[in-house]
Amino acid sequence: MELVTQQPQKQRNIHHAFSLIELMVTMSIAAILIGLTAMSLTGGNASLQLLGAADATSAIFAQTRQLSASTNHTHELRLYRWEENAENRFGFFIHRVDSDGTATFTGESYIADSSTQLSTDLSSVFSDDALIEQPGNPPTKGSAISKARFVRIEIHPSGMTNLNAARADGEACYLSLTTRSEIERSGALHNFVMLVIDPSNASVKVLRPS
């Protein structure tokens, strides 16, 4: 009896090439994913930037309160707004107020990045005559700026403020920070941070709308 040995068949390697349409679809999906990732990162960076600006603002309010209490002298936190290189800018500058009413810049300040904007109309926030915006340049800025004006927020050693007198109803003051890109967009703001200022002691609470 003859045994027949069956040789195993060699497997044929089948190579499937991508068609032009499949390549185009794959590239389109990849481009969409890259775009979505970039948008997500940009939005995240803007949010972090706003929170950083809000924290810095809260910190300089706290620093002004501490200086008033530790030196037993009233200090002003001046909120300046101005135009520089066709951009709207704002910043906070601490001034020591002497007994004769002279205000001297202490050298302590926080100037927000040009992409961070103060979107609130200050005339609607500080409506009392004592808190009306006045013309004047920030201490560290030269003649290259224009339309500079400021609001004086007084903090006394006792913790009392001129906000308390201006807001007789005890209502808090609200400042809104946003990004330049948000202001340039049409429609409602989506990326912004609210600063709630307690008129009784000028403490600041940072609120991020959900």
Image (cartoon, rainbow, N blue to C red):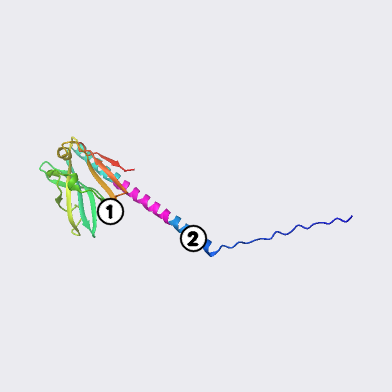
Q: Residue 65 occupies which quadrant of the picture?
A: top left
Q: What's the magenta bit mostly, secondary-structure-wise?
A: helix
- Residue 161 placement (x, y as % from top left): 17, 38
In this picture, which residue range is highlighted in magenta? 35-53
- Residue 205 placement (x, y as % from top left): 27, 40
Identify the secondary structure beneath mark 2: helix
Which residue is label 1 attached to? Answer: 183
Q: Residues within 10 Å of mark 1 (few under 14, many from 20)?
A: some
Is residue 54 visible in the rendered image? The answer is yes
Foreground pick, 172 / 149: 172
- Residue 8 placement (x, y as % from top left): 76, 57
Is residue 105 visible in the rendered image? The answer is no
Which residue is label 2 attached to? Answer: 27
Tell me if residue 37 is in the magenta stretch.
Answer: yes
Residue 186 vs 126, above or below: the answer is below
Foreground pick, 182 / 95: 182
Left or right, 25 with respect to 205, comes to right
Q: Which mark is residue 209?
A: none
Foreground pick, 153 / 4: 4
Identify the secondary structure beneath mark 1: helix
Q: Residues within 10 Å of mark 2 (few under 14, many from 20)?
A: few
Left or right, 164 with respect to 53, comes to left
Q: Which residue type does callout 2 highlight?
A: Met
